[in-house]
Amino acid sequence: MALGPSTSAWRDSQKLSADAKVGPSGNDAFSFWKLQEEWRSRLGAAIDESQATAERYLFELYLSEKQRRPPAALGSYYRFRNFIPRPLRHWLNSAAIRARGHGGFPNWPCESVLLDFWRDWLDRALRSLDVEDGWHIGFWPHNARCCIVLTHDVESPLGVRRMEKMADIEQKYGFLSSWNLPLLEYPIDWSTVERLRARGFEIGAHGLAHDGKLFRSEADFAELGRELQRLAREHSMVGFRSPSTLRRAEWIGTMAFEYDSSFADTDPYEPQPGGTCSIFPFRLGSLIELPYTLPQDHTLMHLIHRDPVPLWHLKAQWIAAAGGMILALTHPDYMGAGEHLARYEEFLKRLRDLPDAWHALPSEVADWWRRRSRMQLCISGGQVVIKGDNTSGAVAARLRNHPLCA
Ligand SMILES: [Zn+2]
């Protein structure tokens, strides 16, 4: 029997949920907040229900099955892409976006529906437990209020040549970052890459090439995904971002990476528009998903012609106020020289001034989120105790001190 779209969407979500439960925690509200274990059995059904609601956003299940895959029309675009001069390519992309329109959900540049859900769920839970406040495991290590992650996709040899200068500026403001490389698109100057790695920067896999093939069919994914994971292993890459952020959640969740960063919290401007509505990491199969949460430089500069810095600043402040993860995605190819680089530096200065922020590499955030999901907070003899194999950095915090529920 053929599965209709809704049945099959449900099947995919169940598969992802089942995978996400490989560890002790999924994407339910109890695991999001990491509440005290004594409450778990009393909240029973509300916890299960919260996972289904959250995953409707996290896995973009509010979109049709067709919308959760790369659009079929992209195939012909990619066949000619390399013959189209870059300015014309940008014009074509922005014309396509105008023609497509924006459905209005998720809102852009800020969508709060999932934050509202986490907060309302907690309010209801505390009321049903008849308590005013309680403890949870803080979202970030060492009591940080929010988290800042800088990532880059390097689209061409020009981008590779600009990496070190951009990295110098990041280090000047106390940041390290990750650089994602397409592994079979152009000859990569590995000496530059290894020098950056030696300085503490992270290197990730940006697929094999921007050709739209990886998620085109199950057969393509089986063949190209295998090659991609082999090359990534060879180069000690633990993170993945799909070229052009084309994606199929149920396939990405099976790959042998520690984290993925192919989803946005909201991005109506990508060839495959959508968004997880999440400014926090979450479980995607066996991976940790780190959605990028600032609009891409390329989108702002070339597609909608907006000055990136004020918009980034606004969004970064909004995320910091909610205690979330500011995850930037910029390209040295577009941002790494001249006036653009000066603007990027200006933004880094503003990011540096955000108080109590954890500056982290994506692999560190993924490791932290995985560890946090395995920890348990218990109250024993009036003492608050965090249990787990490795609880380093974990801090118990008062729920009402968190900006989401103050
Ligand atoms: Zn790219």
Image (cartoon, helix red, strand yellow):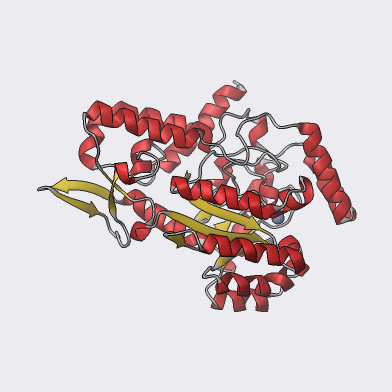
96 lies left or right of 362: right
**Residue 203 visible:** no
Could one spot residue 283 in this view of the protein?
yes
- Between 302 and 82, the one lying in front of the other is 302
Q: Is residue 256 left or right of residue 298?
A: left
Residue that appears at 51% across and 31% down: 56
Q: Residue at x 62, y 52 (%)?
A: 312
Residue 286: horizontal and vertical position, in percent?
46, 48
Residue 167 image offset from top left, x and y in percent: 62, 71
139 displayed left or right of 320: left
| Residue 122 rendering spot, x and y as whole percentages | 34, 34
Q: Quadrant of the C terminus?
A: top left
Vertical position of residue 348 compared to residue 53: above or below: below
Q: Quadrant of residue 68?
A: top right
Q: Quadrant of the N terminus?
A: top right
State the residue in front, 378 or 247.
378
Closer to the camera in the image, 224 or 52? 52
User: Which x, y percent locates residue 24?
Assistant: 33, 45
- Quadrant observed for ligand 1 in the rendered image: bottom right
Residue at 63% over, 37% down:
274
Picture quadrant where residue 226 is located = bottom right
Find the residue positioned furthest to the left. Answer: 381
In the rendered image, the vertical position of residue 142 relative to residue 222, given as above or below: below
Residue drawn where x is 49% and y is 61% of the image: 363
- Horizontal arrangement in the rendering, residue 147 relative to residue 388 (left or right): right
